[in-house]
Structure formats: structure tokens, C-alpha cells
Image: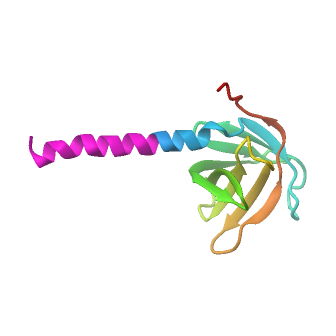
Amino acid sequence: MSVRSSLNPVAMLALAIALLAGSQAFAFQQTRFTFTPTFRDPDPGTRHWEKTGVGYTETLPSGRLNTFRLNKSGKVHGLRGVILQKIEEPNFFVFVADSEAARPELWWWRDKGPWNFMGVMRNVSAPVRID
């Protein structure tokens, strides 16, 4: 067996592990939830979030939509969850705590600043573990 042919299975295994890790990170995420921002907001009121494929769509009270894609799993302020990247604003990230987290919190981050509290998830719909 040549070195070249032995690299393909190794590369394929690494890719499979990366894909499974990404799907596992997304496995305990809410399918939908609402939250009301705790910060001063030009579009005040309750926002609705819904999981779509490998991301979320946020609907603001005005009807405007923001889209986010899964960036990576992570931990913020002691909570495990996922970090989403805003499609329309690539330097803006939102942390969504796992559905099984002790506190159902959302945090945002931009550029080089600290994580900032966004609000608490309400009306949460999430997959139910059967194990």
C-alpha cells in the first residue's frame, strides 16, 4: 500500500469526525424560542427565533429577518451551547445555550469586545432526549 492511498481513509475519517462533532453540537439546540432584548433596541419587542438547517432565522417585531449560521460549539459564562455567526454582519456572533443548560441565556459578541448579555429564552421548543 502506498503512502498516498493510505492518506485518503485518514482524511475521510477526520472529515467524518468533524461533521459528527458539528451535528452533535447542534443536537441539543432549541428548534424555536422567543426572547425580549434587555438592551436598548431600535426594534423593541419580542423576537422569534427558529432553527433552519444549520442555523437560525430571527424575526424582529417589525417583520425584518436576520439569519445566523452555526459557527462552532462553545462555552460562555459557564454554559455550553453553540456560537452563531450573523450572515448579514459577519463580525457579529450570538451564543445560544443548549436546551439542557441551567440558564436559558443568549449572549452577543462583536469584534474584540466581551460577551454581552442579550436576554433569556422563553417559549422554548427543543428536542427531547430519549436516552
Number of numbered discs visible in the structure rendering: 0
Identify the residue at horizontal 39%, vertical 39% (top origin).
16
Q: Quadrant of the N terminus?
A: top left
Q: Which range is magenta? A: 1-19
Q: Position of residue 99 (x, y in %)?
A: 73, 41
**Which residue is at the far bottom?**
112
Between 45 and 127, the residue placed more toward the observer is 127
Q: Position of residue 104 (x, y in %)?
A: 80, 48
Identify the residue at horizontal 33%, vertical 41% (top origin).
13
Magenta stretch: helix, strand or loop mostly: helix
Its colouring scheme is: rainbow
Please determine whether, in this image, residue 122 is positioned above or below residue 105: above
Left or right of residue 42, residue 100 in this image: left
Q: Is residue 87 visible?
A: no
Left or right of residue 21, residue 85 in this image: right
Between 127 and 70, the residue placed more toward the observer is 127
Please determine whether, in this image, residue 12 is positioned above or below residue 42: above
Q: Is residue 16 magenta?
A: yes
Q: Is residue 82 visible?
A: yes
Between 11 and 59, the residue placed more toward the observer is 11
Please determine whether, in this image, residue 83 is positioned above or below residue 122: below
Q: Quadrant of the C terminus?
A: top right
